[in-house]
Amino acid sequence: MKIAVCGIACEACPRMVRGLCPNGEAGCRPKENPFCAIATCALHKGVALCFLCPEFPCETTKKGPIAFGYCQYISGKN
């Protein structure tokens, strides 16, 4: 199972399912992406998944796609 940089399983992502993922079969990875602040941030922070960042959860994760409350919950910082 591929996990996107934001933590969503690529196989469950509606864009991937419809064949509309801008990254194709590779799924969302850390890279400059004007449509995804999380992918861009992860690239600049040098992490493969945003929740591996020591600053997680942060202002960038508040933009989604995962609910910020859930990010706080899984980080134990609620």
Image: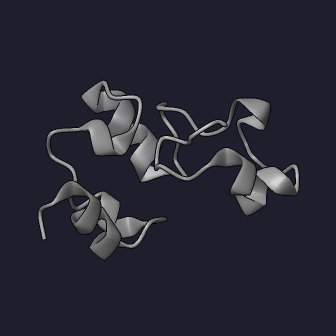
Rendered residue at 64%/36% (across/down): 2
Residue 39 in the image: x percent, y percent? 46, 41
Asked if residue 27 lies left or right of residue 59, the reply is: right
Marks counted in the figure total: 0
State whether residue 67 is above or below residue 21: below
Q: Is residue 62 above or below residue 9?
A: below
The residue lying at 46 percent from left, 49 percent from top is 6
User: Which residue lies at the image location 22% right of the left edge and 66% below the top edge?
Assistant: 72
Q: Tell me which residue sits at (55%, 53%) in the image.
A: 8
Q: Give the left or right position of residue 50, taking residue 34 as reference.
A: left
Counting from the top left corner in percent of width and height, residue 50 is at 35, 43
Quadrant in the picture for residue 12: bottom right
Q: How is the image coloured?
A: one colour
Location of residue 46 (image quadrant): top left
- Which one is in front, 2 or 32? 2
53, 40: nearer the viewer: 53
Residue at the top extreme?
46
**In the picture, which quadrant includes the N terminus?**
top right
70 over 2 or under it: above or below: below
Position of residue 60 relative to residue 10, above or below, is: below
Q: Where residue 29 sits: x, y (%)?
A: 54, 33
Q: Quadrant of the C terminus?
A: bottom left
Q: Is residue 64 left or right of residue 60?
A: right
Instruction: Give the x, y percent position of residue 16.
Output: 78, 50
| Extreme-right residue of the structure | 18
